[in-house]
Image (spheres, rainbow, N blue to C red):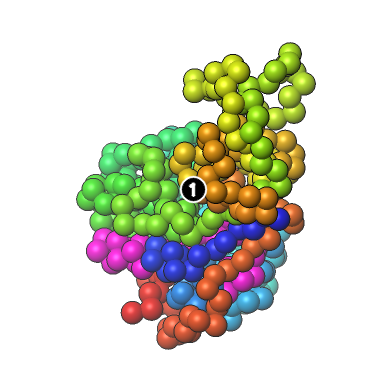
Amino acid sequence: MSQLTINLDALRHNIEQINLWMDRHGAHWTLVTKVLCGHADSLRALQQLGVRSMGDSRLENLHAIERVIDSFEAWYLRLPHLTAVHEIVAASDVSLNSEIEIIQQLNEEARRQNKVHRVIIMIELGDLREGILPGHLVQFYQDIFGLDHIEALGIGANLGCMSGTVPSIDQMMQLALYRELLELKFERPLPMISAGSTIMIPMLLAGQVPKEINHFRIGEAVFLGTDLINGDTLPGLRNDAMILNAEIVEIKEKSLTPLVETSASIRPFESFEGEDAEIPGQRGYRALVAVGQLDTDVAGLSPVNSTFKISGASSDLTVVNIGEDRAGLNIGDQISFHVNYSALLRIMSSKYVTKAVTPKLSSFPEPDSAPLPSEVPPVLESEE
């Protein structure tokens, strides 16, 4: 009834384009897979497209990657929690951290597992999510450098994930100065500043990201091509890698506005009416498709046919105004939708929406395998 189509040609295009941008900047990057929710076919596809470094915020998803990919570098992207230290060390190569107590426990667990666990120390730059205050950096790193099973890769930051903070050149230069301060103070190299994400790509394309920022954690740009700063799609990327197709279960000419008294307190979900609400008494064709709020965040759907307009949704159905005629559509046909990140996340975690990778994986040759670099930040290898 409803199916998400995962277009490998579009994914390949976006990965290759981002590889090109990273190469030009002299940076490495890790593909953030958390929106896939451990979907096995998608993970196999990423492996066949050359992905060798993946990051996720759920240990279950890292285990799902392990089950389908033989060798990759695993990043744990949510701040580690004490009750899962054993599993975090076992399942990931690198984690993002902001608490010395947890890093000490990671060190003890890494010793028990005979491993060296690598860490990025997150710094608070204004988004008010994770990160230590810059004034505590020296003492923090002094404590870390005394741990024998922890390798400090460098520093990092998160912007735009909670407060909608727009990254600036000044913030990036602050990070470069913090790393320089630490290297001078301790006479130890910190090879990585991991501060880039999809939100920073517009700055990257404008040549505004300092060269010191040499690692990016990117997900949304790969799967959706989204320009988080300016809206629409990033230049050079495709926005059709993830398309939701929903089957039409009713199509009729009806009034486009209710003909009886309504109450907002009765409506179970948000209204889609805005400044362009329909004129009372206006009629048109309305198609009901078999997808609803139980399946996805309907507010994050946009019909591929831009003349169509979502009128509203219940838990199981979405109503689409298609115009003054049927637009050639019939019962059993499908209406296709672009999805935003919130809608995609809900779809991938929903058991009610099927997911189909196209073309089939067998049509994509396996890339040449290459070992991950051991003394430089991890890289997403291209097929070239």
Q: Position of residue 231 (x, y in %)?
A: 39, 40
Q: Position of residue 306 (x, y in %)?
A: 45, 41
Is 378 rendered above or below residue 366? above
**In the image as oriented, which residue stretches furthest toward the top?**
261
Q: Of helix, strand and loop, which one carries label 1?
A: loop
Is residue 275 shown left or right of residue 213? Answer: right
Q: In the image, is residue 167 part of the stretch drawn in magenta?
A: no
Q: Which quarter of the image is occupied by the C terminus?
A: bottom left
Image quadrant assignment for residue 21: bottom left
Nearer to us in this view, 290 or 359: 290
Residue shown at 42%/48% (left/top)? 226
Is 28 rendered above or below residue 276? below
**In the image as oriented, which residue stretches furthest toward the left?**
207
Which residue was labeled with disc 1? 304
Residue 277 showing in the rendered view: yes
Residue shown at 52%/73% (left/top)? 359
Chain part drawn in magenta: 15-44
Kindly report the secondary structure that dominates the magenta region of the rendered protein. Answer: helix
Residue shown at 68%/21% (left/top)? 258
Q: In the image, is residue 43 part of the stretch drawn in magenta?
A: yes
Q: Residues within 10 Å of mark 1 (few under 14, many from 20)?
A: some
Q: Which quarter of the image is occupied by the N terminus?
A: bottom right
Residue 344 showing in the rendered view: no
Three-letter amino acid code of the residue under disc 1 = Val
Q: Position of residue 173 (x, y in %)?
A: 28, 45
